[in-house]
Amino acid sequence: MKSDITIPIVAEDGDCSESKRVRVTDDPGLTVGGEDRPVKLPKIQDNGDVGTSGGGTHVVVDALMADVAINDKDGKTNAGHGVVSVMGRQRAMTTAVSTVVDEIPSYDIFGIFDGLRLAKFFEDRLRRLVKEEVKACHGRGVAADWNKVMRSCFSETVGTVGTTAGEAVVTIVGKDEVIVLCRGGARVVLYSHGGVALPLCHIHHHKNGVDQILKIHKRKKIDDFIVLACEGLWDVVSDSDTYQLVKRCLYGKVPDGCESESSTTKAAVILAELAIARGSKENINVIVIDLRSSKVS
């Protein structure tokens, strides 16, 4: 059956929902509503809790961490990352996170999905498709056809998972490029030296008639880190606040009690805590990817 899925490819500096680099504040204090206000970083408990929200609600954070050791011999991306998923003020966890790291030569896969079933499907399907494409391209000496990979994955989603409205955002990190497929529900922002923020995709909802958007960004040496998160974070935390908090974690300025966690996991957990403290009403899924730990060719 012919699929009606279309994926417009947008070049690095092209128009992807008005994507453009924006310099965010580099002041010590975070900004709220355009005003500089100091924000005290929350203390993370040893048991994984992040204390209480502003309303006194106790929140348990399910933090998953995977820092990939650098191994240049097999050409893997080695992008250290931290993941956190929080139910927040919702009655159920309706979103899910998936990662595929240290398996595919030169590429790691990260995603946030509308439900566990969709996440599991994408994880298995993309793992195979990306492996096949990387192997085929290596043999032919040509660039990977990411349009074909993503179109094939979403085509099978409709037939197998049985939904045309499931939301998903996938980020594939390679040594030379970052590929983002946005089908609503989450947002991806790349931050570089000096606090410059480049949205690689904006939140939109496929059920409203917006097709998938494929964005390919050629990596630069100034690229620092990526934050992939759902509406639960972005509804209440700005690009500027996100940059300041992640920067503090990656460069060592973190709260007491975090010594046993990786810097990327610290960043993800603290962002989730800030979102809860500011009244986020959604599930909160955050993936922080440290691009400094992988080399740009």
Image (spheres, helix red, strand yellow):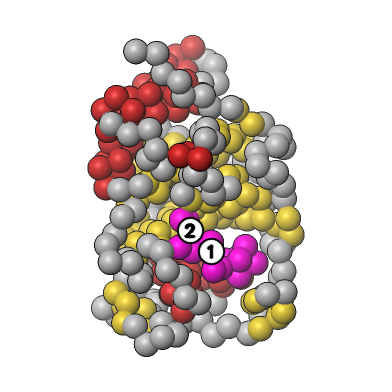
Sort mark 2 into few (<14), some (14-19) or many (20+) by Cα contacts within 10 Å: many
> Which secondary structure, mark 1?
loop
- The segment highlighted magenta reads 229-243
Kindly identify the residue that appears in the image at 65 percent across and 47 percent down. 221
Sort mark 1 into few (<14), some (14-19) or many (20+) by Cα contacts within 10 Å: some
The label shown at residue 231 is 2
- From the viewer's perspective, is 48 left or right of 25? left
> Which secondary structure, mark 2?
helix
Task: Give the quadrant of the C terminus.
Answer: top right
- Name the foreground residue: 282 vs 284: 282
Cα separation, mark 2 vs mark 1, equals 5 Å
Kindly identify the residue that appears in the image at 30 percent across and 40 percent down. 118
- From the viewer's perspective, is 55 left or right of 196? left
Q: Quadrant of residue 101?
A: top left
Q: Quadrant of residue 143?
A: top right
The amino acid on which the numbered mark 1 sits, given as a three-letter code, is: Asp
Residue 272's place in the image compared with 199, above or below, is below
The label shown at residue 235 is 1
